[in-house]
């Protein structure tokens, strides 16, 4: 039997409140995590709107992954304020996430994760998605980085799965693994969308 056990929610998108209502109506608010977002839609906090690396003149996120090797003190503070603002949307709806991941995997960037790591612990978010590792077959700089990132999470005593990949690599015999899927509705049909890391 295959089933989805947990989901995560973007707090700054047009249908956020609809998603919250669905979670409440179906009694699975305990299974909803934060899908932290820095790459799409409107910023929710004032501080990050002052950071042109992340937000354009209209207040929309414009950040592209892997473009922030380092962050200024102002940017780190702004990311933390945005994280709190997105989390607040869920908290005000009675959802207190115990797990988190992020849109386009931005939390796996070292500078961003180090900025929000203290907040993850402070808000009792016990599980954080690791960098994708289940479908990696060769040793590359990218694979070594992912291994280091995953070790960083575990060293901070953050709970993780052992493996993470997307639904295209489903292996029913492998245990302690998280599968990612992005269902979206197009012309009344559900399709799966994939974001490469």
Image: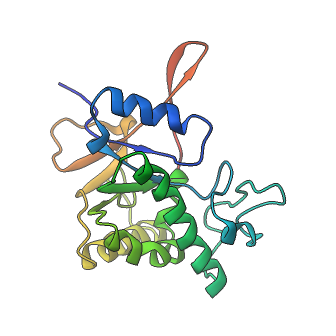
Seen at 23% across and 64% down, the residue is 159
Seen at 39% across and 60% down, the residue is 131
Seen at 33% across and 53% down, the residue is 96
- Residue 150 vertical placement versus 171 (above, below): below
Instruction: Point out residue 157 in the picture as x, y percentages from the top left corner.
Output: 23, 75
Nearest the eye: 90 or 4:
90
Instruction: Point out residue 168 in the picture as x, y percentages from the top left corner.
Output: 39, 35
Q: Which image quadrant is residue 55 in? A: bottom right
Q: Which image quadrant is residue 59 in? A: bottom right
Q: Among all residues in the image, which is located at the extreme top?
A: 188
Q: How many marks?
A: 0
Q: Is residue 160 left or right of residue 68?
A: left
Location of the N terminus (image quadrant): top left
Q: Is residue 57 left or right of residue 25?
A: right
Instruction: Point out residue 41 in the picture as x, y percentages from the top left corner.
Output: 67, 48
Whether residue 56 can be seen here: yes
Q: Among all residues in the image, which is located at the extreme right?
A: 57
Whether residue 72 can be seen here: no
Instruction: Point out residue 123 in the picture as x, y percentages from the top left corner.
Output: 34, 67
Q: How is the image coloured?
A: rainbow
């Amino acid at each position: 039997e295959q089933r989805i056990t947990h989901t995560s929610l973007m707090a700054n998108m047009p249908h956020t409140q609809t998603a919250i209502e669905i979670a409440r109506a179906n009694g699975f608010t305990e299974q909803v995590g934060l899908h932290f977002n820095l790459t799409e839609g409107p910023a929710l906090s004032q501080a990050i709107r002052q950071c042109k690396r992340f937000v354009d003149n209209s207040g929309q996120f414009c950040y592209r992954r892997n473009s922030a090797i380092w962050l200024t003190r102002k940017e780190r503070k702004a990311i933390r304020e945005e994280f709190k603002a997105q989390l607040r949307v869920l908290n005000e709806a009675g959802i207190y996430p115990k797990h988190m991941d992020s849109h386009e995997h931005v939390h796996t960037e070292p500078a961003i994760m180090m900025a929000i790591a203290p907040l993850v612990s402070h808000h009792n978010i016990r599980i954080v998605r690791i960098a994708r590792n289940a479908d990696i077959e060769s040793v590359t700089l990218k694979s070594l980085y992912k291994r280091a990132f995953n070790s960083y999470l575990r060293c901070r005593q953050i709970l993780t799965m052992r493996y993470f990949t997307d639904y295209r690599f489903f292996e029913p015999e492998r245990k302690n693994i998280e599968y990612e899927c992005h269902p979206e509705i197009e012309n009344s049909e559900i399709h799966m969308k994939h974001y490469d890391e």
